[in-house]
């Protein structure tokens, strides 16, 4: 038994109960699973965040002011649920980049991004409750290596997130990521393969590659590597699985990466037997207007980004392309916003994630002139979101009658139907056995049947029906 385990055991006759809530990106969720795994190994009993616990941990996100608010809200909720004797911790990006705003009375401890992956050790240290939370936040710029934990299984999820990169070398004028995460750091290729093989041996049939700046993978390691080479190495693992990429920057979606994912995508004639890349690519565009992109300090033009999207759509049949957009950026004129709307209309995008601009402390954009009123930001967001809904409905309709594979996640309580995601990101309902849960199943996509009101569900959620394809 290690020293942390002894500390936990000696603190109580029963194991201390720990509840952890994850906010934000897939990378944060991957790290949250690592934190829970290490704490369980140290003797903690893991319980849901809604239950009474001895320790509550909010694995926070600071991408927007709303994300910070959600972290504080969860901490206050934890204090109400756990009572005065519970220990409440805010860990991760909000604590790292925006600590002063997270110093609320309900919180006992703030842990930075370097400290949170040693949560079980930090909790074992002596702690005196004070009027203000204790801060254990070391300078993130001192992080030279990537910390990644080999997980035997990714919680109860059907898909597993594999952390291969952290940090970012960009300096986008709106983004606090570099403040919270530091410089770009990559996990060695052999370690990525080892972690992936361990997760696959635990029963997962989908791996999601995650990172803050995933497209920069490999630039900092020796021998130098690339995301496309990593994809090829991972697909050499002789197991049945599919590989999904999380967000990749427009400038990092190189022609080499397009060539590799096109040759290894679902349905490609040269794809490995039982192993393939999902036809789903999320690319943070942010704006379709060049002046706005320049003010954001993005390293591409709208035309270059459009060219990459068109090339992916042309070379990968059935590809689902998604994008992030920020509206109401400082000095974004109505004409500039309309150029973004037109860019989206003409693009092969299938869905959008739309965010009103959120000022972040420490970023260049917070002091820029021409700040857009919040009501105008919301108006633009609603217009772009509505366009996104129409794009998504059109994409889902275009996939009717096609064959794909669906990873079924669970059975819905309301009607007993299985629910899962196709490789190209469409929600699919089906009637099938429990054995399909956690497995990829070949299906033919069809409109939802009229019976039991399923057509009304389709109108609301844009799901399709999966007919088993042998």
Image (tube, grey):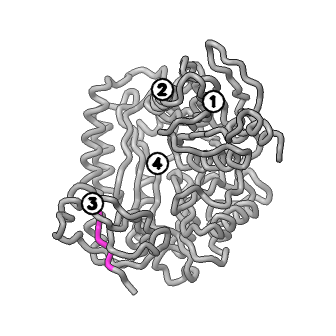
Residue at 71% in and 26% down? 136
Density class for disc 4 (Cα within 10 Å; few <14, some 14-19, many ≥20) is: some
Structural distance between the alpha carbons of marks 2 and 4: 37 Å
Number of other residues with Cα within 10 Å of mark 3, as a class: few under 14, some 14 to 19, many 20 or more = many
Q: Nearer the viewer, residue 314 or 195?
A: 195
Q: Which residue is mark 4?
A: 284
Q: Nearer the viewer, mark 1 or mark 4?
A: 1
Return the disc, 1 or 4, that comes first in the chain's sequence: 1
- Mark 1 secondary-structure assignment: helix
* Mark 1 closeness class: few <14, some 14–19, many ≥20 residues within 10 Å: many
Residue 72 vs residue 39: left or right? left
Q: Which range is magenta?
A: 462-467
Question: Residue at horizontal 45%, vertical 47%?
Answer: 301
Q: Between disc 1 and disc 3, whose residue precedes?
A: 1
Check residue 462 in the rendering and tell me which mark sits there, or answer none. Answer: 3
Label 2: which residue?
80
- Local packing at callout 2 (Cα closer than 10 Å; few below 14, some 14-19, many 20+) is few
Q: Earlier in the sequence, mark 2 or mark 4?
A: 2
Magenta run includes residue 365: no
Residue 46: % across, % down: 60, 45
Q: Residue at x 78, y 39 (%)?
A: 4
Q: Residue furthest top?
A: 131
Residue 254 in the image: x percent, y percent? 56, 60
Q: Earlier in the sequence, mark 2 or mark 3?
A: 2
Mark 3 → mark 4, Cα distance in angstroms? 23 Å
Q: Residue at x 35, y 54 (%)?
A: 351
């Amino acid at each position: 038994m290690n020293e942390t385990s002894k500390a936990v055991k000696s603190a109580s006759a029963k194991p201390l109960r720990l509840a952890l809530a994850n906010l934000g990106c897939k990378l944060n969720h991957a790290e949250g699973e690592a934190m829970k795994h290490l704490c369980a190994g140290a003797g903690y009993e893991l319980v849901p965040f809604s239950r009474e616990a001895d320790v509550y941990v909010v694995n926070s996100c600071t991408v927007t002011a709303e994300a910070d608010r959600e972290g504080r809200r969860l901490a206050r909720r934890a204090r109400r649920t756990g009572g005065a004797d519970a220990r409440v911790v805010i860990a991760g990006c909000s604590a790292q980049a925006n600590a002063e705003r997270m110093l609320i009375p309900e919180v006992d401890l703030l842990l930075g991004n370097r400290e949170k992956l040693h949560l079980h050790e930090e909790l074992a240290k002596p702690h005196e409750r004070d009027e203000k939370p204790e801060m254990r936040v070391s300078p993130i710029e001192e992080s030279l290596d990537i910390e990644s934990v080999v997980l035997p299984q990714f919680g109860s999820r059907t898909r597993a997130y594999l952390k291969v990169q952290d940090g970012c070398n960009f300096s986008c004028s709106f983004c606090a990521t570099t403040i919270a995460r530091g410089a770009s750091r990559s996990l060695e290729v052999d370690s990525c393969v080892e972690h992936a093989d361990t997760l696959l041996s635990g029963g997962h049939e989908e791996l999601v590659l995650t990172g803050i700046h995933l497209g920069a993978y490999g630039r900092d390691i020796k021998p130098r590597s690339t995301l496309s080479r990593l994809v090829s190495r991972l697909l050499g693992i002789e197991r049945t699985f599919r590989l999904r990429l999380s967000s990749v920057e427009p400038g990092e979606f190189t022609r080499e990466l397009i060539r590799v994912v096109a040759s290894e995508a679902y349905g490609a004639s040269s794809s490995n037997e039982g192993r393939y890349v999902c036809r789903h690519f999320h690319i943070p565009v942010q704006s379709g207007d060049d002046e706005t992109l320049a003010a954001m300090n993005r390293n591409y033009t709208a035309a270059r980004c459009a060219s990459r999207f068109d090339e992916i759509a042309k070379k990968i049949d059935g590809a689902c392309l998604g994008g992030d957009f920020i509206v109401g950026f400082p000095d974004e004129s109505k004409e500039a916003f309309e150029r973004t709307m037109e860019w989206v209309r003409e693009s092969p995008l299938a869905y959008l994630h739309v965010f009103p601009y959120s000022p972040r402390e420490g970023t260049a954009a917070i002091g820029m002139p021409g700040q857009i009123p919040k009501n105008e930001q919301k108006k633009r967001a609603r217009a772009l979101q509505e366009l996104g809904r129409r794009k998504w409905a059109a994409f889902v309709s275009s996939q009717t009658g096609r064959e794909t594979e669906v990873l079924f996640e669970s059975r819905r309580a309301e009607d007993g139907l299985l629910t899962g995601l196709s490789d190209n990101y469409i929600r699919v309902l089906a009637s099938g056995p429990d054995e399909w849960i956690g497995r990829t199943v070949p299906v033919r996509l069809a409109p939802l049947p009229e019976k039991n009101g399923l057509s009304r569900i389709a109108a609301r959620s844009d799901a399709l029906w999966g007919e088993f394809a042998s």
